Image (cartoon, grey):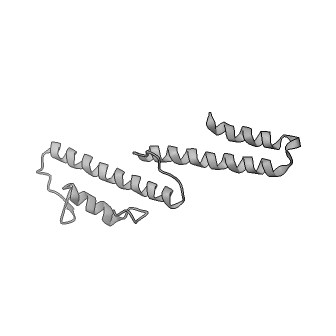
Amino acid sequence: MDGSKAEMTRDDIIRMAREVGLLFDNTLRAPTRRIAQKQKDLERFAALVASAERNVCAHWMMARGFATGHGDTIEDLLTELEWQVREQEREACAQIVEQAGIDGYGTLAAAARIRARGEK
């Protein structure tokens, strides 16, 4: 899968299966291969698919203006995304509070408290 696509296609999966030796002429290789080698091939294939899926997730995040941080796995990327979404929501709430009134009513202090929740 190249870096410009946002989803994995059937052809991408077939290409990865060929790359690790699982496919030959669009069919599974003959069962004469040793089990240990098949296990290694399957592990390599799973790693390729996981990497491709991680790249899809990272591409989606970056296309929407989110940073990917140190996302080595999809779980890492989703944790980073969740944190950024909470930050954006917190900031939006603080801005609404600030716009709701004047400081004499404690709105600036309330907005500061909302922002501070993200620093804990």
Q: Residue furthest top?
A: 120
Point 63% across, 39% down: residue: 118
Q: Is residue 32 above or below residue 1?
A: above
Q: Horizontally, is 50 left or right of 17 in the view?
A: right
Q: Is residue 30 above or below residue 43?
A: below
Q: Residue furthest front?
A: 103
Q: Nearer the viewer, residue 45 or 31?
A: 45
Quarter location, residue 16: bottom left
Q: Nearer the viewer, residue 117 or 30?
A: 117
Q: Residue 59: x and y, percent?
A: 45, 58
Q: Residue 107: x and y, percent?
A: 82, 43
Quadrant assignment for the N terminus: bottom left
Quadrant assignment for the C terminus: top right
Q: Residue 24: x and y, percent?
A: 17, 62
Q: Residue 117: x and y, percent?
A: 67, 37
Q: Residue furthest right?
A: 104
Q: Is residue 76 above or below residue 16?
A: above
Point 42% across, 62% down: residue: 7
Labels in figure, total? 0
Q: Horizontally, is 75 left or right of 104 in the view?
A: left
Q: Horizontally, is 98 left or right of 80 in the view?
A: right
Point 45% across, 43% down: residue: 76
